[in-house]
C-alpha cells in the first residue's frame, strides 16, 4: 500500500481551508500541536463535536509515527472522552509512539486544556506503516 500527502488532509493539510490545519512539531513530550476549536465545529450548544476531538487524536498518533520514522495509516483508534471540549477552548494535542512491532506502530494521544492541563480525551492507536509519497505541490509534511 502507498499513500500520498498532497496538502489537502482535513486534519493537517495546509491547503485545506475548511479543515483544522493542525501543525505538529516533534519534541521531548511527543508530537505536539496547539489549537482553538472554532464555532463551525459545534455539536451541542457551546461544545465541539466529538468527531473533531477524535480527529485531533488521530492526527496526533499519525504525526507521532511520522516523526518517529514510521509513517502510516491508522488501523485502530480507541477514544475515551473525559469531558466536553468547549468551543474556543485552547488545547494542546500530544501523540507518542509507545512501541513498534514490525509494521505496527503502537501509539497514545491526549487532548488537554492548554492552560490548566485538564484532560479532554485520550486514545490508544495502532498505526500501520506504509510507503508514503509527498507531493511537492502540497508541501513537505512537518
Image (cartoon, rainbow, N blue to C red):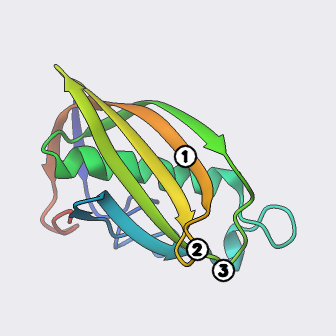
Please tell me whether mark 1 sits on a helix, a strand or a loop. strand
Which circle marks residue 122 in the picture? Answer: 1
Which residue is identified by label 3? Answer: 88
Of residue 140 and residue 94, the one placed in the foreground of this image is: 94
Left or right of 52 on screen, residue 87: right
Q: Position of residue 1 (x, y in %)?
A: 22, 27
Residue situated furthest top in the rendering: 102
The alpha-carbon separation of the residues under discs 2 and 3 comes to: 15 Å
Q: Residues within 10 Å of mark 3 (few under 14, many from 20)?
A: some
Q: Give the residue displayed 73% in from the left and 55% down from the top.
A: 83
Dot 1 or dot 3, earlier in sequence: 3
Q: Give the residue displayed 64% in from the left and 78% down from the top.
A: 38
Q: Is residue 119 above or below residue 133?
A: below
Task: Tell me the quadrant of the picture where the C terminus can be found.
Answer: bottom left
Q: Is residue 2 above or below residue 135?
A: above
Q: Toward which corner of the image does residue 107 lie, by quadrant?
A: top left
Please tell me whether mark 2 sits on a helix, a strand or a loop. loop
Q: Position of residue 112 (x, y in %)?
A: 55, 63
Which residue is identified by label 2? Answer: 116
Q: Are marks 1 and 2 in contact (CB under 8 Å)?
A: no
Left or right of 39 on screen, residue 116: left
Q: Residues within 10 Å of mark 2 (few under 14, many from 20)?
A: few
Q: Are marks 1 and 3 in contact (CB under 8 Å)?
A: no
Kindly report which numbered mark, 1 or 3, lies closer to the viewer in this rendering: 1
Amino acid at each position: 500500500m502507498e499513500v500520498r500527502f498532497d496538502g489537502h488532509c482535513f486534519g493537517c493539510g495546509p491547503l485545506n481551508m475548511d479543515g483544522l490545519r493542525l501543525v505538529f512539531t516533534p519534541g521531548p513530550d511527543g508530537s505536539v500541536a496547539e489549537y482553538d476549536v472554532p464555532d463551525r465545529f459545534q455539536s451541542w450548544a457551546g461544545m465541539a463535536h466529538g468527531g473533531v476531538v477524535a480527529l485531533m487524536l488521530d492526527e496526533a498518533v499519525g504525526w507521532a509515527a511520522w516523526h518517529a520514522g514510521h509513517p502510516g495509516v491508522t488501523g485502530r483508534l480507541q477514544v475515551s472522552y473525559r469531558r466536553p471540549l468547549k468551543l474556543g477552548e485552547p488545547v494542546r494535542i500530544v501523540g507518542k509512539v509507545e512501541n513498534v512491532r514490525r509494521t505496527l506502530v503502537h501509539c497514545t494521544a491526549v487532548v488537554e486544556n492548554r492552560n490548566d492541563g485538564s484532560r479532554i480525551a485520550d486514545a490508544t492507536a495502532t498505526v500501520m506503516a506504509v510507503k508514503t509519497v509527498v507531493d511537492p505541490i502540497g508541501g513537505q509534511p512537518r
